[in-house]
Image: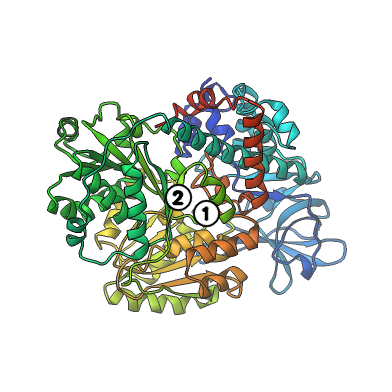
Amino acid sequence: MNLTDLKGVGEKTESRLNRLNIYTLEDLCNYYPYEYEDRRTKGIFANKYLAKKCTFYLKICSTPRINYKSKVTLTSIDVFDGHTYGKIIWFNDKFSPMKLYKDKEYYFYGKLFYSNGYELINPIFSETVMDEIVPKYYLTEGISNKLLRKIILQAIKFFDFKNEFLPDEIYENFGLYNRKHSTKVIHFPKNLDSLNIAKKSVKIFDLLKEICILNSIKENNESINSPIIKNIDLDIIFSKIDFKLTKSQIDVIEEIIFDLKNKNPMNRLLNGDVGSGKTIVSIIAMIICNQNGYQAAMMVPTELLAIQQFEKYKDLIESLGFSVSLLIGSTKDKVNVKKRLSSGEIDILIGTHALLQDDVKFKNLALVVNDEQHRFGVLQRKKLALKNKGVNVLTMTATPIPRTLSIKLNKLLDISILKDKPDNRKPVVTKSFNINSELKLFDLIRKNCRKKNQVYVVTSSINNDEDKNNVELLYKRFIKYFKDLKIEKVHGRMNSNEKDHIFKNFLEGKSDILISTTVIEVGVDVKNANMILIYNANRFGLSTLHQLRGRVGRGEKQSYCFLISENESDKKLKIMENISDGYEIAKKDLELRGGGNIFSTFQSGKNMDIINSLKISRDEIDLAFEIFEFCKKNNIDFNLENYFIENNGGIILN
């Protein structure tokens, strides 16, 4: 069934859904909300409800008044909650207030403010009682929250959920919902209790899939021989590196060598804080394979990152007598690269998903390195490790792993941890600021850019009307204030070519300030960027703030991270000011909200990983392993291969 078979979805709507990476009914089912509005929460005009979103039952006491200030239209109306008078204000909306009649009562949902009296800004309203928990989705032009929910309801009805991962009785025995019911409750929750069970079910379901895949790899690896690695000359490799490796890096290299010498294929996770030097370790591992006459490949999530890695390590690889090539979507001589690869002329291939094409053939591939996006050996659509029999796999991640999960995962795969950072890295100075200090920060930016340094500006939304610090509004403020600087913006709704072009400009120093959402969180490495401003910092989790801070401090320059919010004394922000170690940050994250952000994206859905309430907890980790052990003990089929081949285009059991 196609998207256009759904009621209300024509070619234009389908094209707009595609901009959200929605192409199938399953994509719709898995397009999870980023937050929920509990409109059942009732409020009145009182201080205890300030800055909280509530439903207010109000009487209209005046006709609309319209004022024009600069390019902004302000429409206001007086209201009464039965005890106290207040005001409702609409920005750039003259039409909504016209639907309200004096002396009539309505339900309004919004956030309460106080400025010379109680105010609601741009609330939604209804004549009938508001008693729903309403999911909020990332949207694009032409797709409203209401339309998306209507389409998703149809998708859940028509999508075939027959390939459940586990029998229904398992879900029931452990107090969970099956996939179909979880999906429906997440999109259309009736109450918080069922919503929490649905969220819990999805998290455990996704972790359980990871566990099952890793277990399958382990069992499969025990019966397969890997390429023989015997000849290793680390001294010559180290002599070509113009910096000293840390003790952790040398220890991890020894662990990888032990795996490569083993008769069975390696399946190792390399975990290290941002800036700890994971990539050079993986490059050395690939060179070791080259020393033994084998090829190696590195797959990264973006073209920009592939280009960066290629240019950064090309001289090192070639100085040792080996060849390296780049294969990305925009590579012009693809045919020649593929020809040289299949003949064995290319020793190391660095690229994006372009490496997965069927006509990309290796002569003797021994090692695959999967960068940040491909965590825990998630084997979705990964043909790379199937390019040769018994290929070793090294997966890299900067996400700190909770100790509970690390101990349990160690039974299924090997985990290496880089505990320290290169000596030349200075700690990033981190300081929180109130939004009212913005002009002071602007002065710091100007002074910084005059020294030929570059600046990141990150915020939590693209064009949310309720957010005065969204990407679009910040861009307007910055170009107005910094008329002499080159400013660009980038966000997730742009296509990959647009994003890569803007990132490339920033990398090459063609722009001074880059305003962005969290799309810069992973991978971008610009040594000349030594300052990052994070607006709405209190809305981000600690792990995300730490990842964003890791975009600066990549070189020898002193770097700065400024956390901007309406409450600079927020507990999270103080933790960021005082702690720079990613593992300590992860511990605090665990204390504050029960779990760390373990996976880059939950494999059965989108958006869930950024909702604080969906972070996986210690108890949920334990329950996932408990279900796994129960099923193994009772010989219950996980439906693993059928599920993944049906839904994800094939699994890899190397």
User: Would you place residue 564 above or below residue 155 in this image?
Assistant: below
Confirm or deny contact between disc 2 and disc 1 (CB under 8 A): yes
Work out how far the residue at label 2 is from the one at label 1, CA to CA, in angstroms: 10 Å
Amino acid carrying mark 2 in the image: Ile
Near-viewer residue (104 or 537): 537
Near-viewer residue (509 or 98): 509
**Residue 461 image position (x, y, % from top left):** 51, 55
Asked if residue 4 lies left or right of residue 398, the reply is: right
**Residue name at image x 52 percent, y 39 percent:** 142
Residue, disc 2: 415
**Residue name at image x 32 percent, y 60 percent:** 250
Asked if residue 213 lies left or right of residue 466, the reply is: left
Amino acid carrying mark 1 in the image: Ile
**Quadrant the C terminus occupies:** top left
- Give the mark, 2 or 1, whose residue is nearer the N terminus: 1
**Residue name at image x 40 percent, y 56 percent:** 520
**Residue 66 image position (x, y, % from top left):** 63, 61
Q: Quadrant of residue 326?
A: top left
Element class at badge 2 = strand
Do we see residue 536 in this rendering?
no
Asked if residue 545 lies left or right of residue 343, the reply is: right
Do we see residue 119 in this rendering?
yes
By what rule are the colours in the image chosen? Answer: rainbow
Instruction: Rate crowding at label 1 as few (under 14), some (14 to 19) or many (20 or more) other CA atoms within 10 Å.
Output: many
Element class at badge 1 = loop
Residue, disc 1: 401
The furthest residue to the right: 82
From the image, state whether disc 2 or disc 1 is nearer to you. Answer: 2
Near-viewer residue (131 or 64): 131
